[in-house]
Amino acid sequence: MILHIGFDDTDSRVGGCTTYIAALLVEKLLSVGVEFSEYPNLIRLNPNVPWKTRGNGALCLRIKCDQNLQESVFDKVRNTIRENMNLEHEGTDPGIVFFEGAKIPREIQFFSNKTIQTMVNLSEARGLLRKHNASAIEYGSGLGIIGALAAIGETLDGDHTYELLTYRKARNRGTKRMLNPESVKQMNKETTPQTFGNIDPETGRVLITPRGGDPVLYGIRGETAEAVAKAHHMIETSEEIERWVIFRTNQGTDAHLSRLVPIADAEPYDAVVIQGTISSPPRLVPKRHRFFSISDGTGEIDCAAYEPTGVLRKVARDLKIGDAVKAYGGVRPQSDLHPLTVNLEKLEIITLTSKFTEQNPECPICKRKRMKSRGSGQGFKCVKCGFQSPKARKRLVEEKRSLVEGLYITSTRSRRHLTKPLSRYGREKTKRPSKMISCWHNP
């Protein structure tokens, strides 16, 4: 039988990690004789939902096993998740979904796509579970089954990337992560662009290590399983690694930013692409962030380039009314202080408006001096050589813009997991891998 095991929301805002549970299950399920049909899938869902924990990632394990192993598999999954979930923390609502069959129904695939881009409700997930005879286990409010089902539905048949995640020994969690930053820089130098997001090019800061108390030591993202495995072996650490696993994932694919939405249809917490023209000049709010408005004929909406976005904040500063743009990002809901706002992840400048200023004519004798007006209708005179011309007129000169047309992406340090970096453009994949590398996990 082919079994898809989805689970989500086992962590909390203060700790835990759903990918760590997946790493544990890789070892436990292999020990009972199952075969993994592909790499564990790490599916990042809509990053704008208000109840998410950190990266909003859900997991799916796709396995082949004999029918007589089914109950043993169910027990391993239930027990491992129960032992490692943070149910005592508010907002942790784990969910597990088991779906049997080689083909994932289109409805579940569509639900997954919707979950990555917009808001979905629990009743929709429960309805699909009943319709397609999937079994589920809910804890708390049961919200975790939304992500669990979405992870099953996203089969990554198109573009995808890989991430190798390493995990710390329990005794080291909560302490400073001990790895050699120079080895990360060397790894980055030798493996880019087959790996990405390792180093912040603006500050030189290492980006492969998280900052919280979760069990992840570091994670390396790349285009192939071979690339992240190679990079992993180049990292020097001063602490023992408990285990590591390669995941196949939708990270770095812009899976959430694929819907072109009229401004009138933009909903709070959605991930959207909006095309329009700049309708208000950029403003500083309060002293670090740049805000501007765009309109598209259906309405007007604010866009925010916050200080950590770096590149986007600088680009926003030089926009002018009339510039045609595409804004990519998540919709922040309206409040007493702010209208509906797109928090920018990317900005594409389609066309720049031209602005002209009037200049006095240049003296044809001196060549280097602009003449001065003698008064209305009386022409111009050069104050340097005395040349006069009653027929001379002011001329229109186009102002030189500091911006150029093209795509601008938020600085590396502030990118979301799903945001596609420039290095990935032209490297998009169109099908899943035909086979797995032999060493994709340890133990």
Image (cartoon, rainbow, N blue to C red):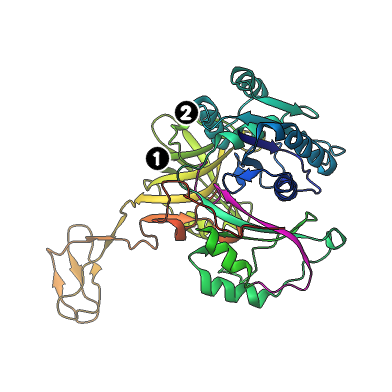
Q: Secondary structure at mark 1?
A: strand
Q: Position of residue 53 (x, y in %)?
A: 72, 43
Residue 348 visible at all = yes
Name the image quarter holding the N terminus. top right
Q: Position of residue 417 (x, y in %)?
A: 59, 51
Q: Position of residue 408 (x, y in %)?
A: 45, 56
Name the residue located 56 percent from the left edge and 60 percent from the top edge.
412
Q: Is residue 248 magenta?
A: yes
- Above or below — where is 239 with respect to 60? below
Q: Residues within 10 Å of mark 2 (few under 14, many from 20)?
A: few
Alpha-carbon span between mark 2 and mark 1? 12 Å
Q: Residues within 10 Å of mark 1 (few under 14, many from 20)?
A: many
Q: Where is mark 2, residue-wise?
A: 264
Q: Where is mark 1, residue-wise?
A: 276
- Image-based side of 8 in relation to 192, left or right: right
- Looking at the picture, tell me which residue is in the foreground, 361 or 182: 182
Q: Position of residue 298 (x, y in %)?
A: 42, 29
Q: Amino acid at mark 2?
A: Ala
Q: What span is colored magenta in the figure?
A: 235-256
